[in-house]
Image (spheres, rainbow, N blue to C red):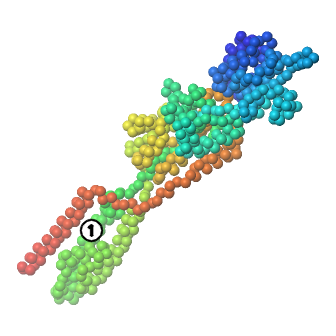
Amino acid sequence: MFFHLHAFEQSLTDVVEKSLQKNQLNIYRKLFNFVVLCDGINNCLPRITNISSRKDKEIGQGTLLRHFSKWLFLNVDPPLSTEVYADLDNIAIAVKEKNISGNSDVKISTLLWQSNGRKWWQIGDLTNNGGTYPAFISPLFPNTAYMLNGRKLKIGILEWDNFCKKSESSTKGSIVYSHICKDLFDSLAEYLNFTYELIEPPDKSWGELSESWSGLLGMVARNDVDLSGIPYGITLNKTKAFAFPHIMYQSECEVVHKKLSNNDNHWMLLVSVFKWAVYVCGLLTMTWCIGLYALLERYSVGEHIKAGEIPACPPSTSDSVMTAVLVPLYQGSLNLPQTTPGRIFYASWWLFCITIVAVYTGNLVAIVSVVKEKIPFNTIEELAGNNNFKIIILKGSLYEDIYKYSNDSVSKKIWSKVLDTRSTNIQNSLDEDLHIKMLLQSSYYAYITSSFTAGGIEKTVNNLRRMKCSIGPNYISLPFPVNSPLVELFTDKLIRLYDNGMLEAWARKWSTTKREEHVHTMTKVDMSNLRSAWTMCLSGIIVAFTVLGIEHFLKYRINKD
C-alpha cells in the first residue's frame, strides 16, 4: 500500500482499525512494515513519527504501532538528528551525506534501546555501538528482540485473598502487593522486558455492568490501565468488552457457610441426653422400686408372712424414697435393708443404677465436649428453599451473571434471596471483606463463590463448611482492553507458566500460609434461661415437701390409731 502524506493519517487509521479487529500478533508483525520516502518533504521524520505516535495512543492502545511496527525512512535530510521524536521502538533512517570526494554516501542508522535511554546507532560504525552489536551482524531493527523494551505498564489491582494481598508497607504514594500476583508479574516483567505500576480503582470495587463498566473492569475498558492484575471469570458479557489471554486457573462453584452445631447450650442440655420416654420409664421404675422396697421391708417373705409378723422397725415412706433416689446419685442409702429379700433387691437396684448413670454420664460428656455438625442443606435446591439462610454473592462476579440472568426456577429463588440480603444487610456488596465479616458474625449466611476464593476465606473463618454447586467449572484469566495487542504476548508467557506448573506452584506456596489452629474446648452449659431453671428447682422442692407432708400425716394417723 502506498500513502500520500496528505492522506497518511486517515489511511493509517483505517489500517490500524482493520488490523485490531483481527487481533492476531503475527499479522501485526508482517503487516506494519513502513518505508517512507522523504524526498522533498520538510521535517519528514518528526512529522511522520508524531502522527503515528498520536494515532497509536488514540486507536492502537499505545501498543500496536509502538512495539509492532517497523519504520524505514529513506533520503532523510542531513544532518543526522540525535533526537527521538516519538514512542516508536523500531525506526531506521537512511541519510545522504557527501564525502570528501564530493560524492554522496548513504549512512543507515537505527534506534537502539540502552539502559540510559534511546540513541541513534549508525550501522557499520564499530566505534559507536559500544560493543553491543558487532557491525557485521547488527540487525536493522534490534529492539524487536527486547519485547516491550522497558516500557512501564499500568496494572489495575485490588486485594483478593488468596491471589493478591496488600502489603503493610504500602503508603499513599506507593502501593505494594504480595502473594501470587507479585510472583506472576515479576516473572512476566522479566520475560517481556517491562516494568509496571499498580493502580487501584477509585471506588475500590471489582466492577459491574450498568450503562458502562465500573470499578476495576471500568478502568480496563476505558484504557486507563493496560490490563487487570486480578483474574476474572470468563463470561459472555466480559468477552464482548475485554480480551482474555490463555486460561490461568479453573475453579468450581462452592457455597460456604459456618458449620452449625447440634449442641443446646442451655440448661436443658442436662436432660437432653435421653429421650423423654426414657425418663418416663425411669420415673415409673423408681416409683415401683419405692413401693417394692417398702413392701419387702415391712412384710417378711415366707414364714414371716404366714405368721403375720412385721419387722420391728419398718422403713418409713421417706426412707424408701431416699433409698431409691440416693442410689443413682452415688450417695448410697441411709439405712441398710433388714431382710434378705430387701438386700437382694437393693443390690439389684444398685447394679441397675450404676449402668444407667454410667451411660448418662458418658453421653453427657460426649455431647458437651464434641461439636456435632448440623447440615442445613446438601444441594443448591435445598439452599433455595431454606428460609433461615441469607445468600450473598459478590457483585461483578461470574456467579452473579449466572443467577441473575438464568431462567431456571431454583436460580431465580437464589437471586431473589441475594437481592433481599443486599437491600437489608449490605450497603456495599462489592466488598469481599464485608462478606467475610458477615460469615464470622453469623452461621446463617451462605456465600456463593469460587473454590479459589473459598480457600482464602477458609484461612480466616474457622469451622467453614464448603458445598459444591451444580454449576460447571469456572475459567479465569486476566482481562485486557478489547483487541489489545498485548494479549498474545502475554498468552505465550502464560502458556509457558501453565505448562511448567509455575501457576500451580505459586498457588500452593501461598495457600500453605500458617493458619491459627482452632482449639476444640469443652462447650459450657449456658444457664442464661434462669426462669426455666428456677421453675424446675421450685417444682422439685414442692414435690419434696408434698411427700414429707403426706408421710407426717400418715404417721400422725397411725400413731393416733
Up the image or down, 310 lies above or below 197; here it is below
Residue 414, position as x, y percentages in the image: 45, 38
Residue 42, position as x, y percentages in the image: 75, 12
- For the point 83% across and 19% down, the residue is 95
* Disc 1 residue crowd, few under 14, some 14–19, many 20+, Cα 10 Å: few
Instruction: Report if residue 511 is visible in the image.
Output: yes
- For the point 56% across and 38% down, the residue is 174
- For the point 21% across and 89% down, the residue is 303
- For the point 30% across and 59% down, the residue is 527
Q: Residue furthest front?
A: 100
Tag 1, which secondary structure? helix
Q: Is residue 556 left or right of residue 340?
A: left
Please state which amino acid type lies under the numbered disc 1. Answer: Leu
Q: Is residue 347 left or right of residue 385?
A: left
Up the image or down, 129 lies above or below 1; here it is below
Which residue does the numbered mark 1 point to in the structure image? 283
Which of 463/198 is in front? 198
Residue 6, position as x, y percentages in the image: 71, 10
